[in-house]
Every structure is written in structure tokens, then in C-alpha cells.
Image: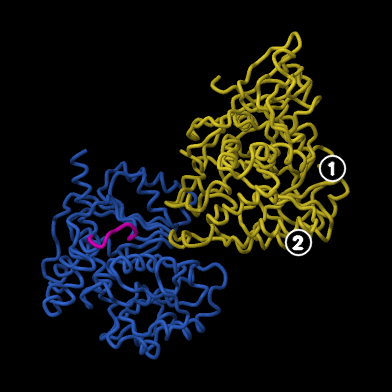
Chain colours: A yellow, B blue
Amino acid sequence: MSPAIRAKGAGKKAFINARLLDPINQTDIIGGLLIKDDTILKSGADVIDATVPEGFEVTDLAGACLAPGLVDMRAQLREPGFEHQETIETAGKSAATGGITTIIALPNTDPVIDDVAGVEFIARRARKVGLAKIFVYGAVSKGIEGTEITEMGLLHQAGAVAFCDGVKTIASARLLRQALSYSAFFDGMIVQHPEEPELSKGAAMNSGELATRLGLTGVSPLAEVIQIERDLRLAEMTGGRLHFAHISTGESVEVIRKAKKRGLKVTCDTAPFYFSLNENSVSDYRTFAKLSPPLRSEDDRQAIVAGLADGTIDAIASDHNPQDVDSKRLPFAQAAAGGVGFETLLPISLELYHNGHMSLLDVITKLTSIPAGLVRIKGAGTLAEGTPADLVIFDPDRPWKIDPYQFQSKSKNSPFDGRLTQGRVLRTLIDGREIFTEGA
Amino acid sequence: MLRAKFFQDHPREMCNAMSVMGPAADHYPHPHLLGIEGLTPGEITLILDRAQHYAEKNRSADKTSNILAGATVVNLFYENSTRTLTSFELAAKRLGADVINMTVGTSSVKKGETLIDTAMTLNAMNPDALVVRHGDSGAVKLLSEKVNCAVLNAGDGRHEHPTQALLDALTIRRHKGRLHRLTVAICGDIAHSRVARSNILLLNTMGSRVRLVAPPTLIPSKIDRMGVEIFHDMEEGLKDCDIVMMLRLQLERMEGSFIPSVREYFHFHGLDRAKLANAKPDALIMHPGPMNRGVEIDSEVADDVERSVIREQVEMGVAVRMAALEILVLNHRKLGGQA
């Protein structure tokens, strides 16, 4: 972050009587945290009212959770090129409301982030807006056209934390092999959208009974695992670091579980859509539930939950994809796919905890330290001394009803519209500055 | 009435019909006709009984009525159609309504206003009914949410085509006297057919058995969950059927290779006299039209006056659409009057 914004980091703060969730040390204790300017000075059980030094502004959190700010490793900000759907500023506000302090943005903007200038543009805009910390994926192929490799090394040097072709599958086996192989020298990671493009051509939803009844073209869930199986071979062959984004089927979980057992350097994430919704959300042609990959069967949803619980699925990302009304208010087949996700990422993920599938600390770990580690962002996803004071304070139990028209995002296309959920962000801090306060 | 006469001759069928399906509903409770899904046997019977009345009237010298005089019916067709459009136009005119036809080419839709804008524009002109055909599944339902007149689905994508299923049902009922305990084989391009989906729903609702006969590539996934039996071999599929319903091979909707060639398709899945011999001797031959002669049906069987009811289907189309328009517009007027 730039010095200009650091200067705004206001003095000395102390949070006491908090449920401290530290994903790095894997501790879940009652304690407190001290902030000096933009960094964490100290955190732990011994930070209590009596031990807070002179000059700190003390806030008693009354048992609310305090965790590292969420690190969202898959989101679309739609700037540059699609500012009518979202901008870096509205995305930043939306992320802050959702407790997200670090975003890794997809490169499928217009122009595509496939050169150094693009990476620098995003960094400059993010600094100016001064909300969430924004990093980018560099495109794997020029113009994400799937043919020619980008200047991956230079992109990496300029700040691209990993590489992907946005919402497109890297279909060419040759291209993926080269990208995996080449990026290994700077420990680059390739992120794949696993969907076999030929099988999924023209598809609007998951294939099966509902697609047949609605008369919509379906894509078989096998299109996902077919792509994953091919790519695992390429990862094995090249020794490159491969990550599968938003996996959505039980077969995918199974195949990745086996690959990890074999010792492959492969990781994956999923989005809240895929562990909290199934294809029935599409009934009545609800275009807000049109996503890519599509919502799957209930069996698949349960397999995703199991994959998260046993660690096969490493991380949870929002898959934030803002679409304007005109892109969604269309016949289902013509409507754009995607849903906004920043402001529902935490509460929907907390359903895993409330439903007894995972501990609160495990859920937070998948939202913070693991994604930060995958994209090699230092100082994020931790409460360690000397790291940036990027924090989220939340009440894990507070019930509320999701109303997209209250969202800060410029787009309101949430498939969770009207859902009753639990868990509310109370405060979000970036570099010690409180950029979101609930009810303020 | 034909149905009454049939029951006079076959009192047992009367008992069956009543016990299985019950009497016609006393009113149609829905604001629109978007599909067969959600209709009860009584509601279907209500429409068919009214359509039967119009079928008789249409054969008499006095074809027209003025029950919908002063009403405006807009036919909004996003797909080219001659038969269905003409049928709806004639139906509305015979009821005394004013009819406007709007045929919107799919290419101009992309350039011009959206479906919703068109719907709002037409809605502002206060029509009593909108008859809509669209190439996308669910498009007619989407449109119905944005207007405050009655909407009739004249076919949306591969989803539903309710008036086709109703006119097929009326044709069957006139010949078989019932809609239950029949075995109906729907043959051909199921995957791309809204007619098949509406017919499966209607025939299942009324208590008949439905078989689907097609090569595996034209059978959509998990369609067995809709309560049908699936056959790939046509001779086996037609065995002891009461009705053979052929579908048009929709080559224009196919992306990729669903069938190797028209020649091969006709060889295995085209209806000819030899394959038809497996069905019951009095089995009816039906086709929603337009037919691809020599592709899914041989001319010899298509034109067989003893067995083919294809032309009667067209005739019943007008009657069913008159019944549907009448019921919906009168419903709408009643609701409008209350508001």
C-alpha cells in the first residue's frame, strides 16, 4: 500500500474480549489484539483490559470473533471495460462490507490483463480507491484466446500473483503444458476453470431431469471431471503448480482427493454457491441461479461439503461475478452466468460451521491463510505480530435475511436473494483503518 | 356430442373415465396458459369439453360468435410459423376478437429491443391476450411476469407447447373416447421437441402410458423420470400401441451430429407400413406438422385415411385455441372488473 494511505491508519487501537481466530497458529481463544498504525503489534490471550498500554483506544468486542481479513482468491471486478456492472471502488466497498480485505481479481477485463500495463493499472486504481487490497491474475494466453502464452515472467514480476484465463477453460493441452512448465521457474501457479468446452457448448444448466423438464440444454457434470483428469496428467508431467477453481461435482472431489494422495502439487477451491445450493434453484428459470459451472445435484452439493470438511478442497472463494439487470433479465439460455458473492461469502461459509460440518476455525482458515498461501501473498491471512492489520470482526450467530438491494456492489445478481442466514460482519479493518462499520 | 355418444355405446368406459379422471373442473383458475405442467385432469377436461363444442360449431355453417367482441388478441411470434399463427388468428377471429400479428425475426431481436421491452410496449396498448412463441425455453413465462393480460404459450424453445398437446388430446378423445388407459408412442426427435414434453405431461396426467421411441442421441437425459418408457427399437416400441405420434426431425435446432444421415434415420426410425404393423390394428397416426415426408414418416402412412388423423389435428387446433382464448380472456375480464 502507498504511504499516502498508510498515513491514514489511525494511531493505536486495542480490541479486547474477542474470540481470536488465528488460522496460522490454529488457535481459537478469547483474547485481544493491539494495532499500531497499520500493523498488528500483538495478539493473544494476554491482551486484556489491564495489559493494554497507555494511549491505545480500547474497544471491547464482547465476545465477537476477530480474524484476519478474508482473502478472496477468485473475483471479477469488471473494471476496466465493464464499469456499468462493477468498478474497483464499488467492488472495494462490497468487499469491505463482506469482511474481505484482499482480492485476487480475474484478468478477463477489457482490455485483458495480459501485459504489465494492465497489472499496473489495477494496482494504481486500487491504491487510489484505498479499500481492499487488490491483486490480479495474469492471463495465461494473450487476449485469453487460448493460443499464445503471455509474458508470464514479466507479469509475475509486475505483481500478478498467479495465472488463469478468466472464466474460460485453458482448452489446449499444449498451451497448458507450456504454461505449467514455464511458470515453474518462478513458482507460478496456473488456475484452471475445469469445464471441457466441447461437451459444455451451449449449455445453460446442469444436465438431468430438471434440464429436461425445463427444456434447457444441459452440461453433464462429467465435463468437469474429464477436464480435471486430463489436466492432472499435465501437472504430473510438468511438475507445475495447478489449481482448479470452483469445483462443483462429487466426481471432481474424488479425483482430486486421489491425486493429492499420490502427492501431486494440485489444489482447488469452491464457491459458496456449490456447497449451499443445488440445481433446484434454477426452477422457474431463475437467471440469478445461472452460474458457471452450473449448480449441480444435491448429491454433488453434499460431496462438496464432504470435500471441504476432509481438506480435499483447500479454499473457499466468492467467485464474485457482477452482472447488470439487462444481462440477467433475459430468457434463461440467453442470460449471463454468474452471481455476486462478496457480501455473502462469510455468512454462507459459516453455514458449514452452523450445520456442524466444520469448526469455525477451519472455515476461517479456508477463507484466509490457505488462499493467501496459495497465491503467495505475504502478511495476509494471519494475526502475527508485524503483519498488516487487515482484520474482520464478526458475530457468527447474528441472523439476517439476504437482500441484494442492500448490497454495496453495483450489481445485485445474487442467487441467495431472500435466504435466511447467520453471521454478520461488524467491522473491517485494512492497514489499521476501519473501512467498514456495521450500522454506521 | 361425440363424447356423450361414445359413452352411451360404452358404459364401462364412462365409469372408468369418471373414476379415473373425474368430471371437468367448473372453472379455469390460472391467469395464463403457459404449459400443461400444473394443470389438473379436471382443468384439461374443461378446456377439451369447450373445444369439442367449438369443433362442432366449426363444422357448421355458423362458425363465428361474438363472445370476444371488442377484445384484442396480439400474436407475438419470435419464430417463423405459418400453421400455428394462422390457427390462433382464425381462432381469435371466429370469436369476434380483433387480432394483430407481430412476427419478429430472431435476428432483429438481437439488434433491437429486448423481450421485456417489447412486452411492456405491447402491454401499454392494453391487449386482452398475448399469444407468444419464442425460441428460448422459459421466455413466455418471463414475458407473462411483466404484463397484465392473459398470456398463451404458443411454444417456447424445447419447453412446452400446451395448445398442441390439447389439440392432440382432443383428437385422441374423439376417436378413442377416453384419454386414460391408452398406450401412446411418441417417436422421433424428443430432444428438441416441446410438443413431446407437453404431450408426456398431459397424457400422464390423464392416466395413459407414454413410450418414447428414438435413437439414444435424441432422448434427453433423465427423461425417464417424467414417467415414460424408453425404446430405441421402433418395432418393439410400437408394439400394441393405441396411438403413434410422430415428431418432426428438427434439423435446424441440432448442433452437432445427433443422427448420421436422414437416410439412416428413416431406415431405423421413420414410420412406414412395416413398422406400423406392430401397433394395434386401429392405432391412430398423428403428427404435429409440418411433416418431413420420407424423413420421419412415409407418405403412404401419412395419407392413409383409415389411420392418419393428421388433418383432423389441424382442425382441432382451431377449436382448442378458441376454447383457450375464450376461457382466458373471460377470466381476465372478470379479474379486471374486480380490480
Disc 1: which residue: A154
- What is the secondary structure assignment of the residue under circle 2? helix
* Position in image of residue A118 (x %, y %): 75, 38
Query: Can residue A119 be seen at all in this image of the molecule?
Result: yes
Q: Is residue B320 magenta?
A: no
* Position in image of residue B119 (x %, y %): 37, 46
Residue segment shown in magenta: B36-42
Labelled disc at residue B211:
none
Q: CA distance from mark 1 to mark 2?
A: 23 Å
Going from the N terminus, do you reach mark 1 or mark 2 first?
A: 1
Give the amino acid type for the residue marked by disc 2 in the picture.
Ala
Q: Is residue A158 left or right of residue A59?
A: right
Q: Is residue B38 magenta?
A: yes
Q: Are marks 1 and 2 on the same chain?
A: yes
For the residues carrying marks 1 and 2, which lies nearer the camera in this image? 2
On what subunit does the disc labeled 1 rest? A
Give the amino acid type for the residue marked by disc 1 in the picture.
Leu
Labelled disc at residue A173:
2
* Position in image of residue A370 (x %, y %): 73, 41
Q: Is residue B181 left or right of residue A18?
A: left
Question: In the picture shown, does residue A429 fall above or below B153?
Answer: above
Q: Residue at x 37, y 88 (%)?
A: B278
Query: Can residue B101 be seen at all in this image of the molecule?
Result: no
